[in-house]
Amino acid sequence: MRAATIAVLVENEAGVLARVIGLFSGRGYNIDSLTVAPVDAEGRLSRITVVTSGTEMVIEQIKAQLDRLVPVHKVSDLTLEGPHLVRELALIKVVGTGDHRVEALRLADAFRARVVDATTESFVFEMTGNAEKIDAFCALMRPIGLKEISRTGAVAIARGTHALMG
Amino acid sequence: MSATTQHADQTPLTMSGAEVVLRALKDQGVEVIFGYPGGAVLPIYDAIFQQNAIRHILVRHEQAAVHAAEGYARSTGKVGCVLVTSGPGATNAVTGLLDALMDSVPLVCLTGQVPTHLIGNDAFQEADTTGITRPATKHNYLVKRSDDLARVVHEAFHVARSGRPGPVVIDLPKDILINKAPYAEAPPATQPHRSYRPQAEPDMGQIRKAVALLKASKKPVVYAGGGVINAGPEASRLLTEFVHLTGFPCTNTLMGLGAFPSQDKQFIGMLGMHGTYEANLVMHGCDVMLNMGARFDDRVTGKLSHFSPGSKKIHADIDPSSINKNVKVDVPIVGDAGRILAAMIQAWKEDTTTQDREALAAWWKQIDAWRAKDCLRYVQQGKIIKPQHAVKRLYEITRESGRDTYITTEVGQHQMWAAQYFGFEKPNRWMTSGGLGTMGYGLPAAMGVQIAHPDALVIDIAGEASILMNIQEMATLAQYRLPVKVFILNNEYMGMVRQWQELLHGGRYSESYSAALPDFVKLAESFHGVGLRATSADQLDDVIREMLATDRPVIADIAVAKDENCFPMIPSGAAHNEMILGPGQEGGVAGVTDEGKVLV
Ligand SMILES: Cc1cc2nc3c(=O)[nH]c(=O)nc-3n(C[C@H](O)[C@H](O)[C@H](O)COP(=O)(O)OP(=O)(O)OC[C@H]3O[C@@H](n4cnc5c(N)ncnc54)[C@H](O)[C@@H]3O)c2cc1C
Ligand SMILES: Cc1ncc(C[n+]2csc(CCOP(=O)(O)OP(=O)(O)O)c2C)c(N)n1
Ligand SMILES: [Mg+2]
């Protein structure tokens, strides 16, 4: 078993996300996270980042199955292809007063989370990082008033000059 | 000036969407559509009425339209075309679409849809057709803009026929069919699709690796499947040439029958669950296996952990997702079977190493010893007709007739007996539902075959249970004067179910008896056909001869032994070398574990 972060460049057309998600659910593959957004100037191409796990044979299947979808341009296993960056964005709401507020701000500072909203009883922190960093931050916030989390799931890109297309 | 530029120039458009669809079909070479009308597709029916280039065949159920198109496609190598209405028309077609997907059959299915402004409102006869058919098609489209219409139809045909063939659905809202739309010619073949580019040309390095392995082999086998049929008749010819060049034994999957001539002395029969003793033992004992266009289906491999344990495996397939899916292989080759075979023949001739002919001769000696078991032997005595005998005589008598013969089947024991006892010398003569195993496939498929080959002899080898699943198509046969022959091996049981119940469920025949059967002779007559019956062995040949001599639809109801089982059989979860050869050996089944029993 291993984890794989897979980047998929697709035509930005109706139903394409349903095809990808249907493939994973229909064939019983894991999705740990999945993100999607258009990435070119004309809005014709979208990039999907899927984090999945499985045996080497299953991951090879996942890539081959993705690649044979008609609107898929390119499939790349970033985990296999070498050094790459993985980032996730999270918005984290913490509600509380007194010492808890002070503690929350102190921890946020240590984790380089930014305050993007504040009331006398709450903060919303914004942080980027890999999943483990966000998990760790949320775990620390839990006893001091963590109320709500919204996360994007991972986006990823290869280091250096190498690009998905060309 | 093309229609598109006229549109851009604001020149008035002259064709309705429905007319654009028909024009695109015609430009794609469509001659026949199998369909059934309804509200959402009335504009297309209106356009059909006003032209003569494309013939419409009115089926009696949408599932049958799809199977008919499959029969048409698989017997010609062309793309089959289907037209159904929205809602129930589309949902009725789903089984056929999945059948075509599993068996890699190229189809384009046009489905009607409610007008664009009503989509999502639970309108009358609305169904989320692209949602429902997504996992049942190679690709599907919902056309929401008239400007996209012609392009989508052309693209659908390209997707259906290229790479690994499969069914494509085009969902057509009624307003798109009624509104004027621009026509555009199909893009030239040289212009690649933006994202879809299947690889047909193999990598020569892989070819040479494969040839080196095969040259050095001592106990080789060629395991050829439906992909060789998909690659066109030339691929079958090249397969035969390659097998002759190398001297190797060749086995075919159920879907590959006809890719290699059954009468050839290097043919060792079908492999798999109901394959021959020699084919399965060759697969088990080989040292190098060449899989040409087959997909290591579970019905072929048996227990995966025990599948051909000592061999190096070469897998040639146009679909990279077929490779390393079930069985890990040593030399993958992605590409079209025809081009791969041509390249392998050339590479074999160029390779200067010599083959170990002595080892190959010893291997053949071993194979001949396995063959001597004569695993398909049966004894026909007395009046009761053995189903195997019925198929064997059907084969012999049609061969004597010298007519070009096409066989379709339903699903069950009769299907396996047809595969075992009917020989095929050429590709595209054998149409069966392998991957989905759809009862009710054979009669409509035969209809499609007969439309494509009006002068050929087309026979559906059927079971009495399966045939009832699309029996309404007898009316279509009558309407279009299609002289299809339905040859029912009537054992009064869902025999394949009964066999599994006998062998795996203690003989508890739960709901597998075919009660209250119709009188098939009268049934044929009431559908304007001819009904024949054989109830004892001495009548069999006469009935077959009369059936062949009748130039009308025929149902021949052949009463066969009710309790016959289909052997050889590899019980589920067992390995190739744990095959049961015949009655008296069922003890072998006692060893089937619960792990085996959960398998289908
Ligand atoms: C009751 C029942 C019993 C059965 N028992 C058996 C049995 O005993 N033995 C048996 O063999 N089957 C049996 N089957 C059928 C079985 O379920 C499978 O359908 C069959 O084995 C698959 O055949 P195949 O491997 O040739 O692949 P197909 O399903 O024909 O697939 C073709 C393969 O070739 C590839 N391909 C397509 N086009 C090309 C091309 N141009 N070039 C190269 N590759 C291409 C495809 O990507 C695919 O991988 C049975 C079915 C039923 C219903
Ligand atoms: C649509 C469908 N439903 C159920 C099955 C399961 N099934 C496989 S074979 C079979 C029995 C077929 O009986 P019959 O047509 O009489 O053929 P026989 O096995 O007796 O030759 C059944 C029910 C199937 N393959 N397809
Ligand atoms: Mg039966």
Image: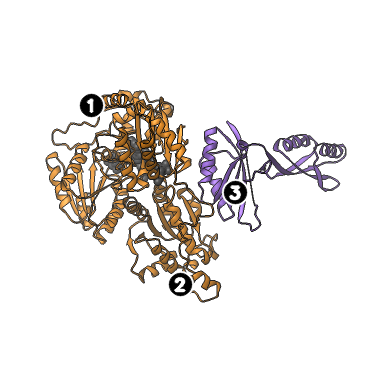
Mark 2 Cα-neighbour bin, 10 Å: few <14, some 14–19, many ≥20: some
Q: Earlier in the sequence, mark 1 or mark 2?
A: 2
> Height in image: A87 above or below B505?
below
Badge 3 element:
strand
> Height in image: A112 above or below B546?
above
Q: How much space separates mark 2 and mark 3, taking CA atoms?
A: 36 Å
> Height in image: B591 above or below B80?
above
Residue A9 is tagged as: 3
Q: Which residue is mark 2?
A: B15
Mark 1 Cα-neighbour bin, 10 Å: few <14, some 14–19, many ≥20: few
Q: Residue at x 48, y 70 (%)?
A: B2
Residue B440 visible from this viewpoint = no
Chain ID of residue with mark 1 = B
Left or right: B196, with B523 as reference point:
right
Disc 1 + disc 2, Cβ < 8 Å: no
Badge 2 element:
loop
Give how far across and how far down residue B53 sits, in percent.
34, 67
Residue type for callout 3: Leu
Residue type for callout 1: Ala
Residue type for callout 2: Met
Q: Colour of chain A?
A: purple
Q: How much space separates mark 1 and mark 2, taking CA atoms?
A: 67 Å
Q: Which residue is mark 1?
A: B372
B460 and B62: which one is in front?
A: B460
The residue mark sitting in front, 2 or 3, is 3
Q: How much space separates mark 1 and mark 3, taking CA atoms?
A: 56 Å
